[in-house]
Image (cartoon, helix red, strand yellow):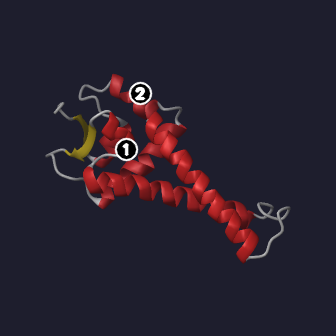
Amino acid sequence: MLYDGFLVTAIWIAVTVVHLALFRFVLGQTAEEIGTTAFDIWSLRVMLLFFVTLFFVYSWRRGGMTLGMQAWRLRVQTLDGHAITLQQSLIRCATAWLSLAAFGIGYWWVLFDGQRRSWPDIASKTETVVLPKK
């Protein structure tokens, strides 16, 4: 999660820079005006959420792994070993946010679950497996 956290931070920085440039140079707001309205704030929040969700969905659908998961040889898959669907990816993302909002309890759950599943695994009917070393 730490490795992917660095990637998410980079995505958020890039999205924020583009958002600021859009409001400054396309919409013509002064530097002091940017971020003062509800539209400014909520449009940035929606963009941040959208692009992070896109990152995870793309990674999971493409190969079952994010870059951080590749480093630890972890793969997300369906219970029968196939690539997860778009719907499962979206459910995993939504449940991941809830798990983190609950102080990470959804991820600590693997310590108590007999099958070592996190809340995102349970909700999306997927599993996270450790790949063998080559």
Rendered image quadrant of residue 38: bottom right
Characterize the local packing of mark 1: few (<14), some (14-19) or many (20 or more) Cα atoms within 10 angstroms: some
At label 2, the amino acid type is Trp
Q: Report the side of 117 relative to 83 (left or right).
A: right
Q: Which residue shows up at 26% across the image and 58% down it?
A: 85
Rendered image quadrant of residue 25: bottom right
Q: Which residue is mark 1?
A: 67
At label 1, the amino acid type is Leu
Q: Measuring from the top left, give residue 6's x and y in whole percent.
A: 51, 41
- Badge nearest the viewer, 1 or 2: 1
Label annotation for residue 108: 2
Q: Measuring from the top left, give residue 70's x and y in whole percent.
A: 31, 40
Residue 125 vs residue 60, the one in the foreground: 60
Residue 58 vs residue 101, the one in the foreground: 58
Q: Report the side of 25 relative to 108 (left or right).
A: right
Tell me, yes or no, if residue 90 can be seen here: no
Q: Earlier in the sequence, mark 1 or mark 2?
A: 1
Tell me, yes or no, if residue 131 can be seen here: yes
Q: Measuring from the top left, give residue 29's x and y in whole percent.
A: 80, 71
